[in-house]
Amino acid sequence: MNYLSSLGSLDDLSTPVIICDNRGIVTYKNKMAMREIRLPRRNTHIERHVLQADKAAFLSIGKSRNACVVGIDTGDRPARAFVVPYLRSGTPCTLWVFVSVIQVFSTNRYTYLIENDITCVASQICKLVKSIDENSTAVKSKSSNTFGIRMLEKIKKVISYIFYNSDDIYISLEKCVNMLVKATDLTFKKFGYNINYSIAGGLEIGANYIDMRSLSLVFFHLMAFFAECGAERSMNVVISSFESKMDIKLTLTLPYPPFYGEGNDPMVLAGLSPKNTVDVIIFSRLCEVKNYQFSYCINEDHLNNMTVYIDVPLKKRAKLRDLYFAKQLSSLDETVLFGDIVAHYLNMLKYRNFNPEDISLE
């Protein structure tokens, strides 16, 4: 399957993208950038909008192999982008990719770790965006299917490294689930999602602990992607736990399923929402890295015709080092952690949900 066959151009991405010429003049804004990044406008200079603290980063674009993180004032709020040089159709320019997860400026260890994970692969994320743009302008005789396979293999290798080398943040399973359910309930409803939760019990069994940092990102992508695929953005979620794992079961109605069957490859589901392919890739590779077991079933029923299962491994309190609890967990303010998760979810939803008909052309 060519997962990217429906991505005709950068306008199909749910991530804001800006392209500037080598003088810093904005020459292109995709639909999402036109919605979310009010300033700078096209045909104006981006440097005057760069945040004072990021002037040095702006001037260093292209001086290293890594992508720069540069913040700008959009006229409504600050926004940050991964920025790399780009040779577009033979013309030097710069590419600005406003990834949602870095829009919450780091204030503590939790937000810093998440930001650091994504920043480590910033250059590769920008390469993905470049490839989508280059493919949209390629000659028609070029095989788009070959392009899609090649790109996906490259991305899989890159995303696989996310979360491998970073510290985990463990909290009790019961606190984790309650926090994530409350966070999604507070944020997702604001964007028209209807997620109905049912806690089947067993969350307190055996003093289980779970990595909150990675699960919070998986949980967001899981809820947002599948609720968006469901009829009227509606979905039922059942959460239960056992001795060594937590089960999450999603049930939703697909109005017109593009295919039927069972499987355990999350990437197959990119065909349900091609514009969110980047999200599916991150979700897929994170599941693999963290050993989350995933499966799905799409049948021919008219209602509740899709079921998604994900099993998340747990750790016992006795298997976590006392040093972890003494030096790391003790310094974690759970009230602040909850606020950070809500802030992340709100910002990622803002960058994910938009109506192209609402976009005013500049």
Image (cartoon, rainbow, N blue to C red):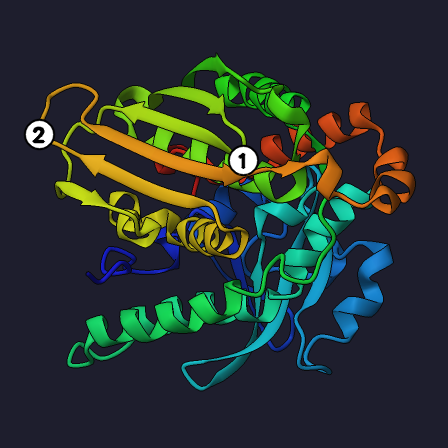
In the figure, is residue 286 to the left or right of 39? Answer: left
Mark 1 sits on what residue? 244
In the image, what residue occupies the spot 49% across and 17% down?
Answer: 189
Residue 236, given in percent of the width and then of the height, sits at 36, 18
The foreground one among 244 and 7 is: 244
> What is the quadrant of the N terminus in the image?
bottom left
Residue 81, given in percent of the width and then of the height, sits at 64, 57
In the image, what residue occupies the spot 71% across and 47% down?
Answer: 168
Task: Give the CA distance from mark 2 to mark 1.
Answer: 33 Å
Q: Secondary structure at mark 1?
A: loop
The foreground one among 48 and 278 is: 278
Query: As shown in the figure, which amino acid type bears the numbered disc 1?
Result: Ser
> Dots 2 and 1: beta carbons under 8 Å?
no
Mark 2 sits on what residue? 300
Residue 34, given in percent of the width and then of the height, sits at 49, 46
**With respect to residue 335, does 340 lie above or below?**
below
Q: Residue furthest bottom?
A: 90
Q: Residues within 10 Å of mark 2 (few under 14, many from 20)?
A: some
The foreground one among 92 and 324 is: 324
Q: Residues within 10 Å of mark 1 (few under 14, many from 20)?
A: some
The answer to which image quadrant residue 207 occupies is top right
Among the two numbered marks 2 and 1 on one chain, the one whose residue lies closer to the N terminus: 1
In the image, what residue occupies the spot 55% across and 23% down?
Answer: 184
**With respect to residue 362, does 135 lie above or below?**
below
